[in-house]
Amino acid sequence: MEEGVSITKHSGVYTLKAQQTIPLSMEKAWDFFKDPNNLSRITPPEMGFKITSSIDRMAYAGQIITYKIQVFPGIHVSWVTELTVVEAPHFFIDEQRFGPYAMWHHEHFFEDFGNETTLMHDKITYKMPLGILGDAVHELLVRKKLRAIFSFRRKIIDEILS
């Protein structure tokens, strides 16, 4: 897959895949992504992203992170994720424990691309709540919003890490 975002659906479950090259060694890229506080830096400002839990350590398996996000203008929701697997500096996985999706499983992979370059892969497997109504909202709003989030991330990661 070229750099970009693809979203597919099978048996009611969506899969988003994205990848991006980062002009840093894998270890330096990991140093940025292992800090949960950097998530707010790579999230579009209009989402009103705010971590509400105390972050006292870098990413570790079992870490619970709570935050608020704006899903629609004026509508904020709480989201709770758990880092279920952390294998520095190669990958980590976060899963929604409570939030706007019926299911959310996000895999982040880092691959040494040589010459101080890292290839970052994201794979998100998610399910919308509310059955066919949720799927309709996905087609009308969520798909576009997720693409916009990853487009923003691509741009801001290039700016911050270049």
Image: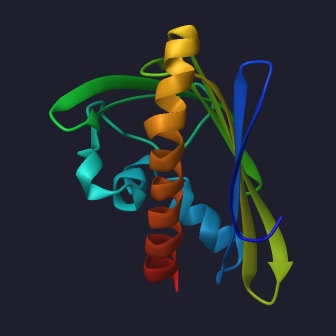
Q: Residue at x 52, y 31 (%)?
A: 138
| Vertical comparison of 25 with 77: above or below | below
Residue closest to the far top: 130
Residue 23 picture location, percent across and down: 65, 84
Residue closest to the far left: 74
Residue 53 picture location, percent across and down: 30, 30
In the picture, measured across the screen, residue 17 lies left or right of residue 159, that is: right
Residue 105 picture location, percent across and down: 65, 29
Residue 101 picture location, percent across and down: 50, 21
In the picture, measured across the screen, residue 131 lies left or right of residue 156, that is: right
Q: Residue at x 65, y 81 (%)?
A: 24
Residue 7 lies in what quarter of the image?
top right
Residue closest to the far bottom: 115
In the picture, measured across the screen, residue 19 lies left or right of residue 33, that is: right
| Vertical comparison of 109 with 84: above or below | below
Quarter of the figure with the N terminus = bottom right
| Vertical comparison of 4 with 38: above or below | below
Q: Residue at x 46, y 54 (%)?
A: 149
Q: Residue at x 36, y 39 (%)?
A: 55
Q: Is residue 58 visible?
A: no
| Residue placed most toward the observer, 65 or 123 | 123
Q: Is residue 23 visible?
A: yes
